[in-house]
Image (spheres, grey):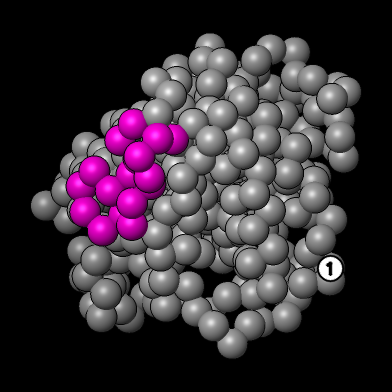
Amino acid sequence: MSGQPAREWTDDPAADRILDVVADVAPEIRAALPDRRAALDGENPTGDRTYAADDYADELLADRLVDCDAVAAYASEERAGQLEGAGGGSGAGDGSGAGGGSGAGDADAYHVAVDPLDGSSNLRSNNPMGTIVGVYDAPLPAAGTDLVAAAVVLYGPNTTMLVADGDGVGETLLDGGDRRLLDADVSLPADPTVYGFGGRRPDWPPAVRSVVESFEADRLKLRYGGALVADVAQVLTHGGVFAYPELADRPEGKLRYYFECAPIGFLVESAGGRVSDGDGPLLDAAPESLHARTPFYVGNASLVDRIESELA
């Protein structure tokens, strides 16, 4: 491969092999988007409408990651169960309970959870989308603290990949087969300026409406585009907070813990921020269902602390 980053993704060779696969696949996903705008008749395991691009991205990532010797098991937002990877042993299980992943195999193989195309409903309106990857050192379902690395790819005006290893975050430009390190030390600005909350304001609990009004009084600017990767990129660039809170008709929240919230939270905490489920540290949780949802608050620690205080 040409144009490798100026450093490895992480200090972990096995995690780096997984991230190399993601970086190689991302330009292929982006190139395929114009011809895969159609919605499909089916739904994913949590009831969301799917698009041809969702299926394509999932199949491509599954094929490549399952063949990677650093992958024990592959889980996706688009699949009910898990696939055993080349680094697995006794089978990946169905993700229905604790220990549902592969329990044997290569000690250096990890369990990978993927949102293949975050924000795919943005495709028709030509707005940003992304891919989210969590690399877990335990069979899924597990705790968020079992993450050893996370990556997000943003398909915006440029295709970029943010990688977190718990100690820091790097950003790399993916330009076809070339890679160029843009920033070896991405960190949240100390002075936050943006906020974005998902869901409808009338459906938010009163405490959530109150904290949003306090952010507006502080003149934080609303930034919300309907793709988690893009919305969190705004927070990482400008400082601030993103949330998809519990709703009146969905107290469990909307976003998936293993495929979206834990990897994004791990990334933001690696950049100096905080992630919470509204009660406390989100990464300490260990939902028992592979497709579990959770309320989600992420960004500058001072703002996440304010939210927790309001919701207490």
Residue 30 at what x, y percent from top left?
Answer: 78, 54
User: Residue 169 or 193: which is nearer the viewer?
Assistant: 169
Residue that carries the numbered disc 1 in the rendered image: 34
Residue at the front extreme, as displayed: 90
In the rendered image, residue 90 lying in the magenta stretch gets the answer: yes
Horizontal side of residue 118 vs 298, given as left or right: right
Span shown in magenta: 88-104
In the rendered image, the residue lying farthest to the left is 312
Image x and y of residue 88, in percent: 44, 35
The foreground one among 36 and 238 is 36
Residue at left offset 30%, top offset 78%: 203
In the rendered image, which quarter contains the N terminus?
top right
Residue 52: image x %, image y %? Answer: 69, 73
Question: Is-magenta flag for residue 183?
Answer: no
In this rendering, position of residue 311 left or right of residue 125: left
For label 1, count other residues whose C-alpha is less than 10 Å away and answer few (under 14), some (14-19) or many (20+): few
**Observer able to see residue 13:** yes
What kind of residue is marked 1?
Answer: Pro
Query: Toward the viewer: 228 or 50?
Result: 50
Q: Residue at x 47, y 63 (%)?
A: 79
Compared across the picture, whether 41 is left or right of 191 comes to right
Q: What's the residue at 63%, 66% (across, down)?
A: 54
